[in-house]
Image (cartoon, rainbow, N blue to C red):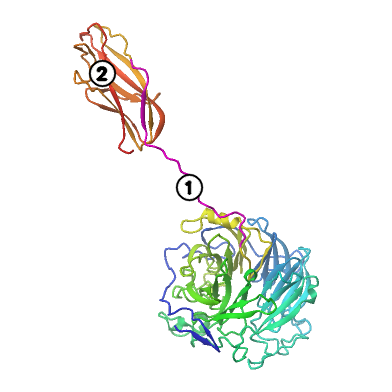
Amino acid sequence: MGAALLAGIPAAAASAQAPAPNYPLTSGDPRIGLAAGAGDTAGKAALGLEHLKNTPLPTTNPSGQPAVNGINSDAAFQGDYAFVGNFSGINIYNIANPAAPVLVKQVYCLGSQNDVSVHGNLLFVSVESQNAKRDCTASTQQAPATPQNRFRGVRIFDISDINNPVNLGGVVTCRGSHTHTLLTPKSDPNNVYIYVSGTSSSSATDQTAIAGLECNNAMADNPNSSFWRIEVIKVPLANPTAAAVVNHSRLFRDETTGRIDGLQNAPQTPQHPCASATPACTPTPPMQSPNLHGAQWQPSPITDACHDITVYEEIGLAAGACEGNGLLIDISDPANPKRIDAVADPLFAYWHGATFSNDGKAILFTDEWGGGNYARCRAADQLSWGADAIYEIVNKKLVFRSYYKLPVAQTTAENCVSHVGNLVPVRGKNIMIQAWYQGGASLIDWTDLSKPKEIGYFDRGPVDANGNPSNGGFWSTYWYNGAIYGTEISRGLDTFKLAPTAGGLTAADIRSAEATQKLVRSNPQSQVSAVYMEAPPVEAPVTGNVPATLSLSLGAAPGLGAFQPGVTQDYFGGTQATVISTAGSALLTVSDPSSTSTGHLVNGTFTMAQPLQVRARKSGAAGTEYFSLTTPKNVFIWNAPVTNDMIEVEFKQSVKDTDPLRTGTYSKTLTFTLSTTQP
């Protein structure tokens, strides 16, 4: 596919040509066929992730307000606390022990999505609902939201007392805040900044108006339109109630024409590519809702806002996932972000999120095809649809390298598409833990930008096997200070730790991640580099040489005592052999080299009638058979190297009552040989 023209700027196409069809696994994976079940009752499969705990959503609220048990959304972390957004408010957990999180406070405050970030004593919460109210209560027929009490934008809470957060109000914005990004510039330590991503309609009607806020539905030829912009909020840390919008950044402007809608303004094809694939995602006969199957673009890839903006303040860059485009942004002046580059992809339905590599030289963008509400990991859904796209930053340009998608098919009862995650700080690698709704969590190695691969996962069966689809799964999965936390839409909070696997992370990899400097906090879309508290391992060979050695020493010469003529009797004697062998195996052989009466004792010209016999054994071992020495005998074998190994060498001489015996000494000089075939 050629490059797409984006209203005056050339945007790199996702790939030089359409990728070959590639489909998810439908057999041979433990995630296939998991039993359905609500809560933590569903079947589970895991690799490289040890499930520590599932903490269900609360059913009651000690404060007397309704329980915060709506749809779980995003999470932020600070110290020993996790702040988990929920469409009903915020749940605050003590996570000092990741295996046993404790819910310490429920903040009931209606206003989807309630995505969160935290800084010191301040908690920031995104609100886009048109019926949310300043006091956090529900809009009812008796007490409806009005222009005077309606709230859309970013709420601010004082969490100096974690058990009693105080609503400080916040900053209202025309399209509300679907998500937001917190910046803490070192150049301005007295303030923090917030980039607001408002993706909803504008509060420009009597039914949605907010007192004191000028909003409109103007088209792009109006430079003051409430669309095609992001709001930048400045928050004075000493006086957060003075927070205000300080810039409406026109990140999508065409610098040549001046039009504010300078990026992608329509899908590149009338329907999603799945509609023309084989098999096509459009059913026959057509169903009422093409969204259910994916043929219709949903969400539509039209760039009039950003969904997520991930900032990497240390390198002065941000990555914008902006509906129809992926952006590279200069944030050296935090109040005035500037677009550096933009790309489009004919396969992307909705540029949703972005994550930098730890070195800041690459970005992984996500596509939320179907908006998270539909099954988009079906057996016939190609692995380039609803996937991640990996770009390398080359001379300040985004260059496509590859796609990654959850590699195993999910059922039509499971909403599934790429969603939110972050880096696991393994030294020298790009490792990401990513949520895929009811597709579970996928641990991804994208160190090789062109060949990302899954190295671990955790998955449950569907919430409801008859759902179309059922609603659940991981909204987000994040690494934070040695553990992984998953906000499950309907099942609560899950915690994990990494486990080594063949072909995945090693114990050394995991140690490098766990040994990073503890973060003070971790916020969605706010990325910091890993600081390693241990130097990288350095291999230094230490060598020593063992020369080939075969050593045999014998004890005192064995004596058999005095032979008694005319009496049948066996006479015994022995010595000890001490062996040093560096060989793989060694053999001890005893032989009589004499050609005279070989194997018999002799006394001058007289020969002992019965042959001399020999055996060898370890001291204390059971006796073994004696062997005649008329031929050389292999008496002992060592099957491994030994040092100063001592064995008993025993001799036996039989005398019968009719054997003639000559006065004098009977003797023979024997040869003991230690040899090997495995030096």
Give how far apart the Cα atoms at labels 1 and 2 are: 53 Å
Q: Which amino acid does label 1 sit on?
A: Pro
Q: Position of residue 266 (x, y in %)?
A: 54, 88
**Is residue 531 a member of the stretch shown in magenta?**
yes
For residue 6, say whether it is visible: yes
Q: Residue at x 68, y 71 (%)?
A: 116
| Viewer-nearest residue: 293 or 542 | 542
Q: Where is residue 394 in the image (x, y as percent from the top left)?
A: 52, 74
Q: Which residue is drawn at 27% across and 10% down?
A: 665
- Image position of 540 with respect to 485: above or below: above
Q: Mark 2 — residue?
A: 612
Q: Which of marks 1 and 2 is in front?
A: 1
Magenta part of the protein: which range?
A: 530-558
Q: Mark 1 — residue?
A: 541
Residue 420 located left or right of residue 204: left
| Viewer-nearest residue: 483 or 594 | 594
Q: What residue type is labelled 2?
A: Leu
Q: Residue at x 70, y 84 (%)?
A: 174
Query: Image quarter for residue 241?
Result: bottom right
Secondary structure mostly seen in magenta is: loop
Query: Image quarter for residue 6?
Result: bottom right
Q: Residues within 10 Å of mark 1 (few under 14, many from 20)?
A: few
Q: Where is residue 196 in the image (x, y as percent from the top left)?
A: 68, 78
- Image position of 317 with respect to 659: above or below: below
For the N terminus, the image quarter is bottom left
SS class, disc 1: loop
Q: Where is residue 385 in the image (x, y as percent from the top left)?
A: 48, 76
